[in-house]
Image (cartoon, rainbow, N blue to C red):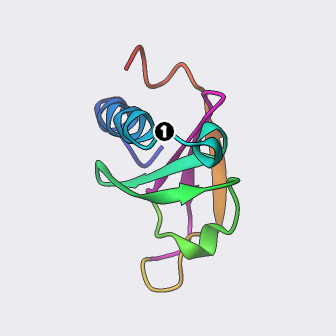
Amino acid sequence: MFNSKEQINCSKQVANAWRESHVCNWNKSGAVITYMGNVTGWRDAVRHPQDYCPGCLAFTANGEIWETIGGNDQHGANAWRLISSDVGGDA
């Protein structure tokens, strides 16, 4: 795991706050993407890891947490890996 539990908790809180402050129909699904504790955007689905550098986190509306792995900052990550939704705790 690239991110520590503390980093995941922090990012989860930021993602939840972003989702709550951007209430609209399109935002009730999909994933909020974070990097280094900051929201970088929203996507309708967790896909195209090459669009993100390794270490990005995606928090889906149904509680899944995904992390980009492999690759590099210049060419993007190689894959999204599902992290247990329990990793982030109660954030």
Q: Nearer the viewer, residue 44 or 10?
A: 44
Residue 49 point in image, percent of width and height: 63, 67
Residue 16 point in image, percent of width and height: 41, 32
Left or right: residue 26 compared with residue 90: right
9 above or below 1? Answer: above
Q: Please report the residue visible at 29 percent of the width from the left and 48 percent of the height from the top.
A: 37
Badge 1: few (under 14), some or many (20 or more) residues near its Cα, within 10 Å?
few
47 above or below 89? Answer: below
Q: Please report the residue visible at 32 percent of the width from the left and 38 percent of the height from the top.
A: 14
Left or right: residue 71 compared with residue 73: right
* The C terminus: image quadrant: top left
Residue 4 lies within the magenta run: no
Residue 31 point in image, percent of width and height: 59, 47
Left or right: residue 91 compared with residue 31: left
Mark 1 residue element? loop
Q: Which of 5 and 85 is in front in this view?
A: 85
Q: Where does the magenta region start and end?
A: 55-72
Residue 56 lies within the magenta run: yes
Question: Which residue is identified by label 1?
Answer: 23
Q: Please report the residue visible at 41 percent of the width from the left and 14 percent of the height from the top.
A: 90
